[in-house]
Image (spheres, rainbow, N blue to C red):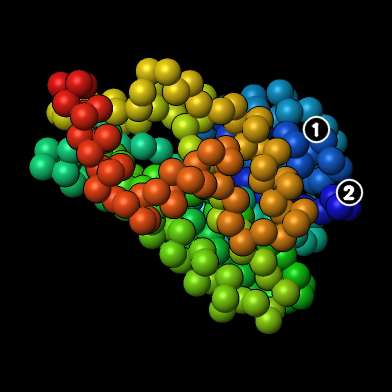
Amino acid sequence: MELAGKVVVVTGASMGIGEAIAKIFAEHGANLVLLSRDAGRIEAARGRIGYTERTLALSCDVSHREEIDRVISLTLHHFDRIDVWVNNAGHGLRSSVAQMDMAACRTMFETNFFGAVSAMQAVIPVMKQQGSGTIINISSVAGHIPLPFGAAYSAGKFALNAIGKAAGVELSSSGIHVMTVCPGYVRTDFAANAVKGQEAREIRPASQRGISAQRVARAVLQGYAKRKKEVIVPWGMHPAIKLYQLFPRVVEWAMIKRSQRAE
């Protein structure tokens, strides 16, 4: 796998999974464009990642298409091309369906789903003109197994899974590859930063600590190198997803028990 000189853009790169993905691509020789809504935080992440001679930090709110177009223009001006675009920007919403604030739900979808789709629509013409490129959508296992008290977040990830896989088929003859990445529980500040509604129960078992953002980043890099269509990490999530597909009531029963204990 040759990454030296490749141009990689990562949204939501100021912390957690996004920062870890940016760092591992930079370590393998790529030029990086780091995006975040907060200019100060993304510049701080750029300092932590290092390789400042071939990294660029820009503010960008992906819920606004004009901001995506602006950073694409700046990237092309600075690096001449875009080889990889990573849609990672997003946040959580912990609430029951019954009590969920619809304004908060729409705001989350504008970033988590519509922001990713807008970025795909903006970067696909660039990659088509180049004749190559890879789009990586950071989704979640919650896009395969609906998450109680996180239903809106799951719905957005289900939608992202579907649109990424469909786009991969549509773009198969254009030289553009689309990969969907579905991590399980990850040890980041994601849960702490999630918007919390009136019913924000935690159904994750206390014993399940989750994997590191660095492990997710390694899986992303390996999936990119192997041109995988989907990456599920850790491996143990594969049987969980298959169990839900074949015996959903078994998984739902376990979730009911956990949510009752969380009351």
Q: Earlier in the sequence, mark 1 or mark 2?
A: 2
Identity of the residue drawn at 46% across and 59% down: 161
x and y percentages locating residue 211 in the rendered image: 56, 28
x and y percentages locating residue 245 in the rendered image: 37, 56
Q: Is residue 198 in view from this perspective? A: yes
Identity of the residue drawn at 59% across and 27% down: 212
Q: How many numbered discs, if any? A: 2
x and y percentages locating residue 48 in the rendered image: 71, 23
Q: Is residue 39 in view from this perspective? A: no
Q: Amino acid at mark 2?
A: Ala
Q: Is residue 47 above or below residue 31?
A: above
Badge 2 element: loop
Quadrant in which the C terminus appears = top left
Q: Is residue 143 above or below residue 235?
A: below
Residue closest to the eye, 62 or 77: 62
Nearer mark to the viewer, of 1 and 2: 2
Identity of the residue drawn at 88% across and 52% down: 2
Q: Which residue is mark 2?
A: 4
**Callout 2 environment at 10 Å: few (<14), some (14 to 19), or many (20+)?**
few
Rendered image quadrant of residue 257: top left
Q: Which residue is mark 1?
A: 52
